[in-house]
Structure formats: C-alpha cells, structure tokens
Amino acid sequence: MNATAKPDGKTITVTVEGTNKTATLPIISGTVGPDVVDIRKLYDQLGVFTYDPGFGATASCESKITYIDGDAGVLLYRGYPIEQLAEQSSFLEVAHLLLWGDLPNATQKKDFELGIMRHTMLHEQIRRFFDGFRRDAHPMAIMCGVVGALSAFYHDSLNINDPEQRRICAFRLIAKLPTIAAWAYKYSIGQPFIYPRNDLGYVDNFLYMMNAVPAEDYKVNPVLSRAMERWFILHADHEQNASSSTVRLAGSSGANPFACIAAGIASLWGPAHGGANEAALKMLADIGHVDNVPQFLHDVKDKNNHTRLMGFGHRVYKNYDPRAKILQGSCHEVLAEMGIKDDPMLDLAVELEKIALSDPYFVSRKLYPNVDFYSGIILKAMGLPTSMFTVLFAVARTVGWISQWKELIEDPSQRIGRPRQIYTGAPARDYVPLDARG
C-alpha cells in the first residue's frame, strides 16, 4: 500500500505570521503508525523550511520493509514480528523476506540459498588487498576499503537500472561480506585465510571461516550456530537508522551499490551506532562487580558526573527493546554451552538490569535495555574480540542495507537527497584587501 492522502481529505493549514500567505498541507497515512504532514510544498507556498536536527521527526522516504513502534516495543520485518522470525526462521529466509517482500516457499528458499552460496568466493586478486593493511588495522577499516573496492572487480552488476544486475549485486554483497569479515579477522590474528565452503549453510560457513585452521578439522557447534543465526536476524534491519539513511543518501546520487554499502559500513563504525555493544561491554568491565552497581547508578544519576549508562535507552524505543529480550535467552544458552556457569559479567548485567528497571529515575526516563546490552556478552563468550563486534553487525545489516537501497532505486518518487539548513554564519560582506585588514 502506497502512502496516500487520507480518504477524508484531512489537511493541516499553516500560516506564517506577518504575511498573508497560508499553506494547506495534506496528511498522509501509512499502513500502520502515526500520520505525517506532507511538507513538500511548504517552501513553494510559504517560503520557509522545517528544522529537525537529526531528522527525529521527519520521514525521509516511504518504505515497506521495517516497522517500529517504539512506545509499544514492537519490531516488524515486512509485517512479521521479530520474535517469531528469531525463533522459527533462518537468516537467509529473513534475507529473502526483506529483499523480495515475502517469506519463500520451499522451492524459492532452495533457489535463493543456492544463489547466495554461489557468490561466497572473492576474486583472488582481492586477497592481495589485505596485505596492504597494517597488521594492527581495525577490521572495520579493512571492511570499508575492501567492500568499496568490489566495484573494481564486478563490473557486470553496476547498472542500477537493470533489475537482473541489481539482483546479482544483492546476492554478491550478502554472500561476500562474511568472507571479507572472516578474512579481516584472520588477518588481524595472523592466521591463514579459510576459503568458504558452499556445502555449509550461511551462518555455519561464516563460523567455519572464522574459526577453522588448516592444521585440524573444525566442526561447527549447533548451539553457537543457532545463537549467531538469531543474532544476525535481530540485526538485519532497523528502519531508517544512521547507516541505512547513509546508504539511501549515497544511493540517491546513483552511486553503485558496492560504494553505497561501504558508506553504510563507515556510518555503522561510529560508537553511537554499531559500536554501542562494545561500549556496553566496556561499561560492565569498568563496574567490575555486582557490589559496585549501586554506586555506579548513583554516578549515572548525578548531573555533575559524566558517567553514562550504556546499553539502555534507544532513540526510537521507549519501551523494552524486543531484540534485547530475545538476546537475553540466547546469552544464557551460549554461556551454558561454553561451560561458563557463573559468569561475573552476566551476573553483573542481570543485577544492573534489575535495579535499573525498578529505579524510578530510569523508569521515568524509559531507559530500558536495548539490543546492545546482551549482544556484546554473547560475542565475547564465543571468543570474539571487541574489534569484531561491529564487523558482525555489518555482515548482518548488509541484508537490510541492500534491501533499503533496492527499494530506493525502484521508487519513482525518490530524488537525490538534499537536506536544507539554517544558515547562521556571517551575512553578505565585501572583500577587504590584505593591507587594509586590521
């Protein structure tokens, strides 16, 4: 269903004081969620723009992919609750859903999985790129560089106006990101690269490339595989966040999809976005012990103190992040499988959550646990260094990014992104010769 003016013709009238100009703006409704005011004619009719730093109250596009109800704590992929998908679906099934709009039938599922797995290999010359990075390079820096360079190798899928080339490019990005991520990890620890195995599933293949070594056989642990699959599903898309908006903005210029995804990776790298789970883990390490939680929370509430509660609260969610509830269960499963019975960090996380959820200060501010609160603990228990946390986020979110990019390209109403501004600099002035300047 496309966004349209409400059947009753409901509008909003805006008048600029001091002028005789009045604009009547239509109210637009989506399938679910709040109505929005269509302000596209506001400047033409009144000569004014809107001001919304961070675009927190502005819809930049129409989308059918993801819906979030932050007050109710609801996350839907193409209408399906995230809880159902995380429990019953596979990551590639969710990828099909996000890309094409529906869950696949048995034949479609098989064809889609085969289509993805045929593209897991990287061009052999790309392997040489890794040798050009310093040994201590951050894996996200490697990801940005290598993904951006893919457009130099796959010229046959750069025509964004060809649906078949868009499909092939989507398959390539989803398939090759795990290989790039695993090789970035292997490079950072000095181990040989492990080539993909297409007889393994998507997540199992990723874990294999991350953990296997030529000297011995590696068998994927099914409990860890399922936890990682669920982790990927929960991070696959999240509406118009910073990185998805970056991908769309880059795509609006007609840039090739490899460049657009590289831009999304760069945006995700920021500590306020993809690096938040690493920050939450560092916070727990700094607290150190359950006995220190009361003092820590006291410091958080002290307005003169710069202590921050990481992993709680969200720009959109004003309720419990539904992804956090799912990851809490996965966290216990992974720790049990790894033989970590009394994990001080998990005990600390549970105690912190319990106190924060009952403290009027945090309850009144709706600072509920978000997805980053438990995800870092899971990845740490699986033996991954913190430098890889955002890389895994990028692998999962690539599905959402390419879905958002594809939707943008296929939307005839989209134009090149061009936000406006309030200029607060110097007014017009004349040039002063050097010898006349004081």
Image: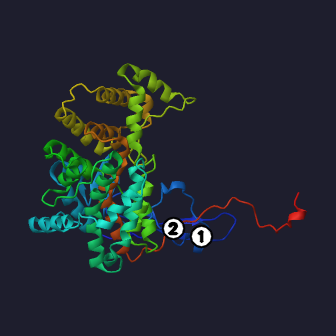
Looking at the image, which is closer to me, 107 or 136?
136
User: What is the residue that sits farthest to the front in this orientation?
Assistant: 215
User: What is the residue that sits farthest to the top in this orientation?
Assistant: 291
Q: Is residue 416 above or below residue 358?
A: below
Quadrant occupied by the N terminus: bottom left
Residue 43 % position (x, y): 58, 71
Q: Residues within 10 Å of mark 2 (few under 14, many from 20)?
A: some
Residue 34 % position (x, y): 39, 57
Is any atom of residue 354 visible in this view? Answer: yes
Residue 213 % position (x, y): 21, 48
Badge 2 is on which residue?
39
Is any atom of residue 6 visible in this view? Answer: no
Label 2 sits on what residue type?
Ile
**Nearer mark to the viewer, of 1 and 2:** 2
Q: Between disc 1 and disc 2, whose residue precedes?
A: 1
Q: Secondary structure at mark 2?
A: loop
Q: Is residue 196 above or below residue 318?
A: below
Left or right: residue 259 compared with residue 320? right
Badge 1 is on which residue?
22
